[in-house]
Image (spheres, helix red, strand yellow):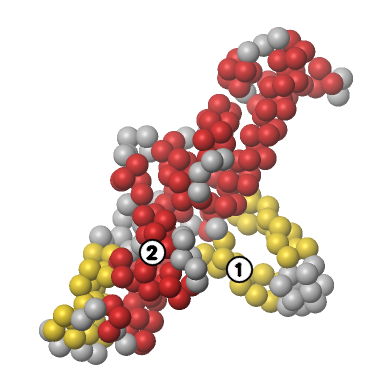
């Protein structure tokens, strides 16, 4: 895996602007592993996908992640720092077993872990209850009670809860919770860290900065965009400093 080049950042930004989040993730992954088909990339578990995205982000922008959120209790703006190596719960190349089994009481459930196809399918659900039910329906391969087949709707609440827990344990990178604390009011809470939306926001900022650099240097020197983007960041900055006199 290699860091994204300036040209690739602009390409991803250009393509990804018109895509829903899950398609953006696949666009990014295509640069991580161009040998895989889009179907193969979409079939990665959510945790595998996010581990790859985190690694790509670290290689491209460095290990430190700077975030901003708002306290849900008092509304205070909160800045926080994360270190990418501390966020890896699995090796990006780790592949959990394709099929898993849950045995509890008289029930046995064979299931697979959620992937990008599943996230796309539930993205249009109107509420979390409907989304959770659809996700289970898609991921449960077979369920039985004392040897007799049952549907996902027939599974007791405690079996469904245990199944959800086992999915999280088997693919922990899919759900990273951050422990946050508000210095203003002392409120403590947990927030879900979404590497896709975090990384995309950073790439948008990077793309706009690159466009401004291209605009300035092309206007001053008459260079082509491709030539400017082929320069190292340090070299572009040196020319920009000469142009602006800084």
Please, is residue 91 above or below residue 142 in the view? above
**Element class at badge 1:** strand
Number of residues whose C-alpha sits closer than 10 Å to that of mark 2, classed few (under 14), some (14–19) or many (20 or more):
many
Please, is residue 203 above or below residue 176 in the view? above
Q: Earlier in the sequence, mark 2 or mark 1?
A: 2
Q: In which quarter of the view is residue 223 placed?
A: top right
The residue lying toward the viewer, choosing from 178 and 142, is: 142
Q: Position of residue 128 (x, y in %)?
A: 48, 72
The residue pinned by badge 2 equals 171
The residue lying toward the viewer, choosing from 21 and 171, is: 21
Q: In which quarter of the view is residue 116 placed?
A: bottom left
**Element class at badge 2:** loop
- Left or right: 232, with 79 as reference point: left
Please, is residue 33 above or below residue 70 in the view? above
| Label ID, residue 191 | 1
Task: Look at 22% across and 85% down and name the residue there.
Answer: 107
Number of residues whose C-alpha sits closer than 10 Å to that of mark 1, classed few (under 14), some (14–19) or many (20 or more):
few
């Amino acid at each position: 895996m290699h860091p994204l080049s300036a040209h690739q950042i602009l390409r991803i930004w250009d393509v990804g602007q018109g895509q829903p989040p899950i398609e953006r993730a696949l666009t990014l992954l295509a640069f991580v592993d161009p040998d895989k088909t889009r179907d193969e990339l979409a079939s990665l578990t959510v945790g595998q996908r996010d581990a790859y995205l985190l690694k790509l982000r670290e290689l491209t922008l460095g290990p430190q992640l700077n975030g901003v959120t708002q306290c849900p209790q008092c509304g205070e703006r909160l800045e926080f720092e994360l270190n990418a190596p501390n966020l890896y719960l699995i090796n990006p190349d780790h592949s959990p077993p394709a099929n898993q089994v849950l045995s509890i009481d008289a029930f046995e459930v064979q299931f697979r872990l959620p992937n990008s196809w599943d996230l796309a399918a539930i993205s249009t659900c109107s509420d979390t209850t409907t989304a959770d039910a659809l996700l289970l329906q898609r991921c449960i391969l077979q369920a039985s009670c004392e040897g007799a087949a049952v549907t996902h709707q027939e599974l007791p609440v405690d079996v469904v809860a245990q199944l959800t827990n086992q999915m999280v344990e088997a693919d922990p990178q899919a759900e990273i919770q951050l422990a946050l604390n508000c210095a203003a009011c002392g409120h403590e809470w947990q927030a879900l860290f979404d590497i896709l939306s975090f990384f995309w926001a950073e790439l948008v900022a990077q793309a706009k900065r690159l466009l401004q650099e291209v605009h300035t240097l092309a206007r001053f020197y008459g260079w082509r965009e491709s030539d400017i983007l082929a320069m190292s960041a340090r070299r572009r900055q040196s020319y920009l400093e000469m142009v602006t006199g800084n």
